[in-house]
Image (spheres, rainbow, N blue to C red):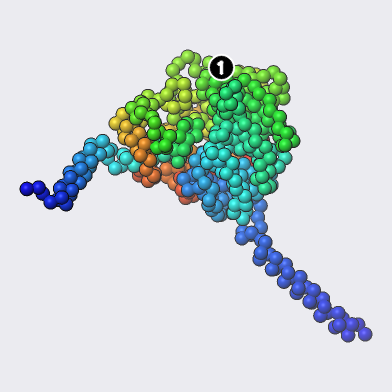
């Protein structure tokens, strides 16, 4: 009795299975990215500055996965990541803002939003991407999904309608953004929680702020000043107290040495309750206590520091240098604040990026056309990857960090 | 009797070419140094002035941007820097003659970067 019944039922069941398998396979052909399913936690991008191209890399096997072309002028390019760590927002010198799908290795949106730009940031909730511009000076906010313009906030100052170059942009809790005005000597905080109605507060900072950082908790914003000896610090938990000068007079009245490349403060070095900051016009790394904001120490280094970056555990700080000493890298021990290693990883080391937990550091050797990877334990090279005139290296672990 | 016009034209043309070649040879650095200078200007000056020299923290250095600037002033800026701005003095890295070659090239439209020279690591 049961045999003929099941014989009648089987064919439709088989058909259902075959048809759904076909539908699944066909849809997979059209919608799946070319790479197999994988996470993004060990991915990153490397800027090939002269060719308007980036390389998608992975840090577990240290390989290049793909290349993405057509990103415009990438001199001084920087990158922030979407909160799901899948999309890279690439800010080019020529004002280009490009959203790249890192997994599929393709451009999903691109706008040219200014004549001359210097970088950007992404909001706490990941919905707003903000570009900082030199020309026309100001910040612009974009929808992170579509790159549609949400707000244009000019960095106007004085009474003659002038606009300042904007530097040192960082994201803050509450979809606020903090940045500095190079020409106007100000720090500004713009609240974009209602993007159609941005509200900006202004603070006098000092002469020629050139870059800035925000501490990992989003509390302190520190702007380096080119035009005076010292840094401007704003406590964002108590902004009504205004800007405080820290390390004022660190040059001790001595004539500054030439600065052939502006230091970068972003990519902060906060380690063990101390901030490690590049001096301007002095071959020193300045160490300041992040509670008292008093100077703790100053460390003599090879040349003008550019990036002063803490390993993620804060045990070491790695430093690279301005032209013509950009073939050197030094490592500072944060327990006794001494230089413990001097390395020559390659010609023209422009940038360094630690893997998420810091067991390795990737360094771009522009004039050797390669990325060199160092083991941070042994401080010896682990390998290298070919890249044309590489500059910035950005790993997706930045997606979860304030100020990155 | 006058020489045929074609001969006169060719003679003048060759003469001018020789003079031009001699003049440019006199202030032209050797090819390796030339390549190095182009690389420095594109890459290292480019960190403030942009790889395309269209400007950044520093002003644009394109022929249009420099057209109304006296070349001597530009050479002095390269050699001595510009106090009160981030422009540092480059004397010691480039000679005054090299600075004036750079200014000349900038005003004509700067050559493309041929890459770093295959020299020993910078130190």
Is the N terminus of chain A in the top left, top right, bottom left or bottom right quadrant?
bottom right
Under circle 1, the secondary element is loop
Q: Could you tell whether A287 is left or right of A82 in the image? A: left
Q: Residue at x 49, y 40 (%)?
A: A75
Marker count (numbered): 1
Task: Give above or below for A157 relative to A153.
Answer: above
Q: Could you tell whether A330 is left or right of A3 in the image? A: left
In the image, farthest residue toward the top = A253
Closer to the camera, A192 or A29? A192
Task: Give above or below for A62 relative to B41.
Answer: below
In the picture of the structure, the residue carrying the numbered disc 1 is: A248
In the image, farthest residue toward the left = B1
Residue A180: image location, x then y, percent: 60, 27
Closer to the camera, A253 or B46? B46
Is the C terminus of chain A in the top left, top right, bottom left or bottom right quadrant?
top right
Give the quadrant of residue A2.
bottom right
The 10 Å Cα crowd at callout 1, few under 14, some 14 to 19, many 20 or more, is some
Residue A370: image location, x then y, percent: 46, 47
Closer to the camera, B38 or A234? B38
Residue B3 seen: yes
Residue A148: image location, x then y, percent: 66, 45
Q: Residue at x 70, y 22 (%)?
A: A239
The chain identifier of the residue carrying mark 1 reads A
Task: Give above or below for B55 relative to A67.
Answer: above
Q: Residue at x 58, y 26 (%)?
A: A161
């Amino acid at each position: 009795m049961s045999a003929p019944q099941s014989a009648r039922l089987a064919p439709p069941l088989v058909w259902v299975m075959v048809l759904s398998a076909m539908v699944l396979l066909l849809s997979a052909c059209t919608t799946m990215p070319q790479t197999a399913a994988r996470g993004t936690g060990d991915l990153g991008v490397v800027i090939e500055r002269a060719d308007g191209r980036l390389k998608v890399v992975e840090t577990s096997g240290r390989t290049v996965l793909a290349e993405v072309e057509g990103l415009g002028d990438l001199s001084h390019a920087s990158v922030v990541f979407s909160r799901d760590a899948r999309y890279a927002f690439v800010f080019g010198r020529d004002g280009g803002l490009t959203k790249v799908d890192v997994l599929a290795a393709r451009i999903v949106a691109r706008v040219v939003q200014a004549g001359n730009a210097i970088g950007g940031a992404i909001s706490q909730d990941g919905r707003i991407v903000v570009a900082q511009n030199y020309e026309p000076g100001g910040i612009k906010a974009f929808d992170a999904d579509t790159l549609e313009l949400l707000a244009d906030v000019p960095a106007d100052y004085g009474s003659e309608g002038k606009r300042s170059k904007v530097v040192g942009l960082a994201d803050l809790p509450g979809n606020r953004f903090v940045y500095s005005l190079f020409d106007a000597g100000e720090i500004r905080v713009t609240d974009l929680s209602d993007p159609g109605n941005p509200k900006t507060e202004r603070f006098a900072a000092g002469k020629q702020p050139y870059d800035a950082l925000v501490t990992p908790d989003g509390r302190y914003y520190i702007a380096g000043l080119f035009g005076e000896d010292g840094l401007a610090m704003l406590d964002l938990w108590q902004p009504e107290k205004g800007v405080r000068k820290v390390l004022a007079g660190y040059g001790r009245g001595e004539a500054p040495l030439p600065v052939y490349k502006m230091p970068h403060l972003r990519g902060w070095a906060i380690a063990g309750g101390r901030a490690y900051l590049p001096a301007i016009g002095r071959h020193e790394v300045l160490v300041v206590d992040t509670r008292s904001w008093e100077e703790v120490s100053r460390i003599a280094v090879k040349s003008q520091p550019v990036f002063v970056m803490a390993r993620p555990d804060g045990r070491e700080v790695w430093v690279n240098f301005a032209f013509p000493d950009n073939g050197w890298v030094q490592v500072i021990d944060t327990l006794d604040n001494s230089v413990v290693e001097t390395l020559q990883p390659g010609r023209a080391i422009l940038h360094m990026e630690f893997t998420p937990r810091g067991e390795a550091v990737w360094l771009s050797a522009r004039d050797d056309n390669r990325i060199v990877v160092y083991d941070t334990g042994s401080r010896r090279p682990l390998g290298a990857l070919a890249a044309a005139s590489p500059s910035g290296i950005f790993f997706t672990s930045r997606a979860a960090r304030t100020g990155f | 009797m006058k020489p045929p016009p074609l001969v006169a034209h060719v003679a003048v043309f060759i003469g001018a070419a020789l003079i031009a070649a001699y003049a440019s040879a006199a202030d032209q650095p050797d090819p390796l140094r030339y390549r190095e200078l182009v690389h420095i200007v594109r890459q290292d000056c480019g960190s403030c002035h942009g790889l395309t020299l269209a400007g950044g923290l520093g002003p644009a250095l394109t022929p249009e941007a420099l057209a109304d600037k006296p070349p001597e002033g530009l050479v002095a800026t390269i050699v001595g820097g510009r106090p009160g701005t981030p422009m540092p003095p480059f004397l010691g890295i480039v000679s005054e003659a090299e600075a004036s070659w750079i200014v000349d090239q900038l005003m004509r439209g700067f050559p493309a970067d041929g890459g770093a020279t295959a020299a020993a690591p910078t130190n």
